[in-house]
Image (cartoon, helix red, strand yellow):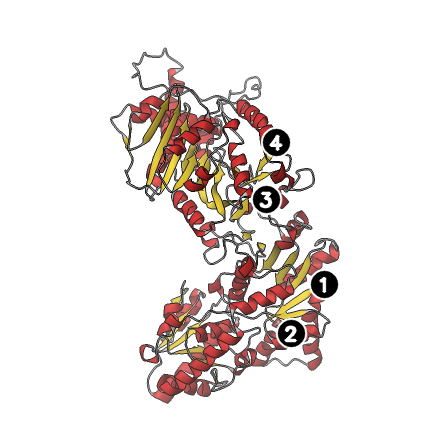
């Protein structure tokens, strides 16, 4: 069988880069056309009458290859990604023009956004761009086209458009003047400057408008631009002090982690730039001294910045960009950039004096205007989704509070599960950089690459601290002058000792102390320690460390405090990731002993609901014992509002029981074991009921199910305790104390 040629292989790879786009649809058609072209090379071409509006697609430009060795089979010429786009775009446009079809855009009396397109030839790219607008915009919009005297098929294409504002100029006045004149003709509240060699993806327009509505300090919104090669053109751009510019992450994979978080940037390319029309008018649009093109958007962004309006990069806005689609050649475009850079420097001396120098700073340092004092690295086991339990909800809240305090936060999960990016930020601030996905470094490499970049590092859990200590032993200068804060999350030795006691393993006092000392001594290199309770704080203070108590937080929402008359049954909430975990053992005790004891005492089976991410075997086990198992629930509010009693039959644990706090905040009285009550410092028959045997536990559950007065009393006192001890403000105060550069979030709002 004949092996696929170079061209066919390239197309297969090319379609993978743009899977789901119209390029994939045209892939087979291109291959068929190329096969027919090779056959025609063997015979005289037939004359074909071509309609006047149609121009044949240019043949693919071959990439020069090494001469073939003697007697070797000559390889097929390779096609560059841009040549491939050219070829397919021409085929697509010709198919449209030779048909009776028209591009009919919706007409709105008051469009929300005006999209300004400046054209100079490249009708085939314009056609694709217009199709992407028609297919992917749900907001009321209008298209304003300024044609700069195009000489190709553009006129024929424009004749096929409906409900589009078209300005035809017989001369080429250049991009800058054309944008200003197009903007004058627009009527939308927002103005999108869009290159005709781009293709929008779904939601791009709406996302950009949402950003501008949400934050009045944002002056413009830019996109994640993807080149035909399937790599990034930019993820926001940097303006250096000498006036030169750099597209951040250029050439990287399109989902590289450094390009996947929102942040303020120096400027974003006008290939896609969403602005308020009022701002564009207030600053008199682009400076026409930059005609015909280049540096006009850099200058405009600098002027916005001087007025306190920053540029915002949003990776959820994805735009395909041909690049240099109308400039004639890359060389010509680069010449224009060089010329206009001089003008930009002369006009913006004060602004450039505050920019980073490319001779002393790295792109990493210059990617945002955030000073080093406000950069923070947070190391956790994994991305802390709230539904994972096991202390991750607390880490989730900490990340939110760090962002509110004005920090530029990087999250480094020790386990890289390569989660789909559409899910990564489901309950985390989108301004947090998350080191996950493909092409991620290991911890040592990451810390080496960013040595000295962060002012603060918070690392959670003892096994992670132990690994960092090993790295610091080998390389004592690995962290530079970064302040190291150890987040104990829990003293895990205490939990392990309790687990051993329950299974009948005797541990000597000497061994107990040895195990505890090994965990406490992990903090030797730490500058400060965070603990979840005052009792655990004393253990670390005995090591001579600065210690701060940082517990959990949960907001009490009055509308969720439904009355007792509307509630029924028992509720257990918790994640089960392995069969030896505290939650797994809790469910065993609940199903094997507590629920049978309740049936024996009351004469009827209990109505038991279980929620949380857990193993399939665990779910089957619970259902076998008559429980309703919900599995993972994105929002537990409704589940809590329906439950009458929350049960926490945990027999060994460390830290603080987050789910008890959450249940109490939703107005659900709790029955828990003594170890959990002590961790919370809550008392029996005040904030909760306490039981350590199955008979006692069953009796307490039945009391709360049957006694409305007791139920109301427990609920009220538990709500008081949550409001007093577990507020978000408390976490913010603790972080402010443990991170010297932290500031009051009320004085500085950062978009999340």
Q: Nearer the viewer, mark 4 or mark 1?
A: 4
Q: List x then y, in percent, for residue 224.
A: 48, 41
Q: Counting residues from the N terminus, which is met first, the one under dot 4 or under dot 1?
A: 4
Residue designated by label 4:
346
Q: Earlier in the sequence, mark 1 or mark 3?
A: 3
Residue that mark 3 sits on: 367
739 above or below 47? below
The span from disc 1 to disc 3 (Cα, nearest Å) is 30 Å
Q: Where's residue 435, x and y in %?
A: 56, 51
Residue lying at 41% horizontally and 64% vertically, measured from the top left: 632
Marks 2 and 3, how far apart in space? 38 Å
Q: Quadrant of the N terminus?
A: top left
What residue does disc 2 label? Answer: 537
Dot 3 or dot 4: first in sequence order is 4
Discs 1/2, front: 2
Query: Between 97 and 210, which is closer to the camera in this rendering?
Result: 210
569 lies left or right of 422: left
Residue found at the very far left of the displayed protein: 100
Looking at the rendered image, the disc whose residue lies closer to the viewer, 2 or 3, is: 3
* Residue 525 circle label: 1
Element carrying mark 2 = helix
The residue carrying pointer 4 sits among few (fewer than 14), some (14 to 19) or many (20 or more) residues within 10 Å by Cα, namely few
Q: Residues within 10 Å of mark 2 (few under 14, many from 20)?
A: many
Q: CA gap, disc 1 to disc 2?
A: 17 Å
Can the viewer see residue 390? no
Q: Residues within 10 Å of mark 1 (few under 14, many from 20)?
A: some
Horizontal side of 589 relative to 539 (left or right) equals left
């Amino acid at each position: 069988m004949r092996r696929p040629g170079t061209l066919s292989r390239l197309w297969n790879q090319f379609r993978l880069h743009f899977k789901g786009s119209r390029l994939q649809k045209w892939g087979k058609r291109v291959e068929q056309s190329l096969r027919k072209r090779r056959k025609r090379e063997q015979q005289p071409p037939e004359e074909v009458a071509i309609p006047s509006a149609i121009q044949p697609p240019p043949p693919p430009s071959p990439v020069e290859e090494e001469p073939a060795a003697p007697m070797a089979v000559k390889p097929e010429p390779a096609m560059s990604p841009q040549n491939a786009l050219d070829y397919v775009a021409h085929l697509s446009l010709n198919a449209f023009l030779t048909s009776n079809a028209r591009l009919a855009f919706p007409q709105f009396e008051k469009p929300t956004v005006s999209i300004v397109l400046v054209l100079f030839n490249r009708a085939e790219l314009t056609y694709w761009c217009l199709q992407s607008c028609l297919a992917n915009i749900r907001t009321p919009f209008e298209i304003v086209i300024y044609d700069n005297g195009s000489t190709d098929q553009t006129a024929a294409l424009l004749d096929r458009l409906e409900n589009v504002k078209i300005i035809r100029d017989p001369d080429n006045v250049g991009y800058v003047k054309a944008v200003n004149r197009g903007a004058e003709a627009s009527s939308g509240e927002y103005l999108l400057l869009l290159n005709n060699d781009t293709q929008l993806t779904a939601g791009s327009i709406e996302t950009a408008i949402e950003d501008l509505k949400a934050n009045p300090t944002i002056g413009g919104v830019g996109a994640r631009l993807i080149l035909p090669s399937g790599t990034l053109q930019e993820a926001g751009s940097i303006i250096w002090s000498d006036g030169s510019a750099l597209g951040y992450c250029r050439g990287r994979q399109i989902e590289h982690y450094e390009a996947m978080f929102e942040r303020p940037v120096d400027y974003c390319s006008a290939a896609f730039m969403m602005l308020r029309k009022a701002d564009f008018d207030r600053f008199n649009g682009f400076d026409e001294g930059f005609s015909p093109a280049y540096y006009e958007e850099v200058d405009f962004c600098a002027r916005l910045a001087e007025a306190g309006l920053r540029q915002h990069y949003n990776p959820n806005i994805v735009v395909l960009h041909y690049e240099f689609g109308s400039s004639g050649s890359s060389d010509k475009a680069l010449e224009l950039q060089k010329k206009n850079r001089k003008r930009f420097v002369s006009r913006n001396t004060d602004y450039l004096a505050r920019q980073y120098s490319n001779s002393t700073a790295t792109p990493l340092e210059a990617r945002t205007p955030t000073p080093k004092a406000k950069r923070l690295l947070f190391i956790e086991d994994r991305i802390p989704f709230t539904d994972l339990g096991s202390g991750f909800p607390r880490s989730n809240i900490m990340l939110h509070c760090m962002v509110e305090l004005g920090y530029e936060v990087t999250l480094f999960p020790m386990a890289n599960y390569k989660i789909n990016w559409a899910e990564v930020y489901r309950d985390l601030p989108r301004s947090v950089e998350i080191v996950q996905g493909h092409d991620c470094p290991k911890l040592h490499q990451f810390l080496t690459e960013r040595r000295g970049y962060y002012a603060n590092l918070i690392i959670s859990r003892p096994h992670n601290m132990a690994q960092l200590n090993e790295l610091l032993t080998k390389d004592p200068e690995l962290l530079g002058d970064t302040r190291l804060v150890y987040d104990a999350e829990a003293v895990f030795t205490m939990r392990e000792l309790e687990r051993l006691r329950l299974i009948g393993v005797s541990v000597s006092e000497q061994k107990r102390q040895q195990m505890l000392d090994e965990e406490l001594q992990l903090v030797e290199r730490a500058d400060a320690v965070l603990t979840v309770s005052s009792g655990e704080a004393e253990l670390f203070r005995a090591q001579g460390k600065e210690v701060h108590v940082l517990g959990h937080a949960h907001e009490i929402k009055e509308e969720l405090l439904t009355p007792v008359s509307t509630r029924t049954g028992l509720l257990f909430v918790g994640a089960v990731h392995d069969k030896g975990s505290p939650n797994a053992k809790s469910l065993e005790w609940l199903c094997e002993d507590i629920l049978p004891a309740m049936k024996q005492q009351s004469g009827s089976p209990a109505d038991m609901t279980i929620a949380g991410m857990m193993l399939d075997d665990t779910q089957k086990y619970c259902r076998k014992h008559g429980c309703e198992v919900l599995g993972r629930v994105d929002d537990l509010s409704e589940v809590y509002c329906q439950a009458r009693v929350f049960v926490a039959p945990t027999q060994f644990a460390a830290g603080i029981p987050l789910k008890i706090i959450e249940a109490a905040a939703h107005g659900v009285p709790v029955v828990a074991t003594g170890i959990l009550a002590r961790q919370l410092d809550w008392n029996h028959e005040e904030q909760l009921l306490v039981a350590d045997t199955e008979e006692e536990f069953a009796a307490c559950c039945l009391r709360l199910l049957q006694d409305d007065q007791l139920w109301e009393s427990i609920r009220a006192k538990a709500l008081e305790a949550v409001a007093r001890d577990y507020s978000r403000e408390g976490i913010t105060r603790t972080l402010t104390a443990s991170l010297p550069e932290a500031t009051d979030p009320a004085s500085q709002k950062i978009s999340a």
